[in-house]
Amino acid sequence: AQRVTQPEKLLSVFKGAPVELKCNYSYSGSPELFWYVQYSRQRLQLLLRHISRESIKGFTADLNKGETSFHLKKPFAQEEDSAMYYCALSSYNQGGKLIFGQGTELSVKP
Amino acid sequence: DSGVTQTPKHLITATGQRVTLRCSPRSGDLSVYWYQQSLDQGLQFLIQYYNGEERAKGNILERFSAQQFPDLHSELNLSSLELGDSALYFCASSPGRGGLYNEQFFGPGTRLTVL
């Protein structure tokens, strides 16, 4: 079964500290992985997709097929990074629907 | 604003009632997706339409139905409402049928409260 697991409900760090938001997935096939961010119950915004290998707002994520993980990292957290972060899995063969993890709330303290 | 729009923003209704949520996709996008966000279930995919036709279905209840019209806007109908249907309902759109290069753009959501 397709599944996305984000083991941490809440992650609290101080400004300037490194951040790693964990995401593990289970999927039989070639997954398409994304990170979405939601600020204060606003609309979800795409942060990263695994194929692009780019850095957005200082965040990066690497797909590790061996460990079936797609962890989100940032070397130095900023207060404005405080938000809900959702890892999501997609499959073109199933219409491109997104399967979301439960989300991790990141709180960056001054 | 050429992004995804949803109306209404908030909806308060009673158990047993029926409501309709409306979504207008981004200009040019052919796919519309509906998601439900609740505290206990998280974000769950409900249904996808592509150019007027149903393309994929998630764990959508039989009491719920959706359609996409020729002008590509979509409506999600929720009937015989229960307390547990209270949630934030998001609509998203994308240019094609789905896939890696087919980013989904989300609307602001409709907050449904069933009393």
Image: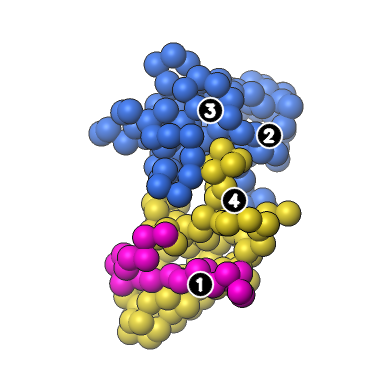
Chain colours: A yellow, B blue
Per the image, label 3 sits on a secondary structure element best described as strand
Residue hosting label 4? A99
Residue hosting label 1? A71
Q: Earlier in the sequence, mark 4 or mark 1?
A: 1
Residue neighbourhood size for the residue with mark 4, other residues' Cα within 10 Å, grouped as few (<14), some (14–19), many (≥20): many
The answer to whether the residues at label 4 and label 1 have Cβ atoms under 8 Å apart is: no
Q: Is residue A5 above or below residue B87?
A: below
Badge nearest the viewer, 3 or 2 = 3
Taking the spot 37% from the left edge, 66% from the top edge, the residue there is: A53
Q: Is residue A60 shown to the viewer in this render? A: yes
Find residue A39 and report its horizontal and vertical position in percent.
40, 57
The amino acid sitting under disc 1 is His
The residue nearer to you, when weighing B111 against B78, is B78
**The magenta stretch spans residue A50:** no
Taking the spot 59% from the left edge, 25% from the top edge, the residue there is: B54
Badge nearest the viewer, 2 or 4 = 4
Instruction: Estimate the spatial distance between the alpha carbons at disc 4 and disc 1, rounded to whole Å.
Output: 16 Å
Q: In this image, A90 relative to A27: left or right?
A: left
Determine if marks 4 and 1 fall on one subunit. yes
The answer to whether the residues at label 3 and label 2 have Cβ atoms under 8 Å apart is: no
Residue hosting label 2? B60
Instruction: Estimate the spatial distance between the alpha carbons at disc 1 and disc 3, rounded to whole Å.
Output: 31 Å
Instruction: Estimate the spatial distance between the alpha carbons at disc 4 and disc 3, rounded to whole Å.
Output: 16 Å
The answer to whether the residues at label 2 and label 4 have Cβ atoms under 8 Å apart is: no
Residue hosting label 3? B49
Which residues lie in the magenta part?
A51-71
Instruction: Estimate the spatial distance between the alpha carbons at disc 2 and disc 4, rounded to whole Å.
Output: 14 Å
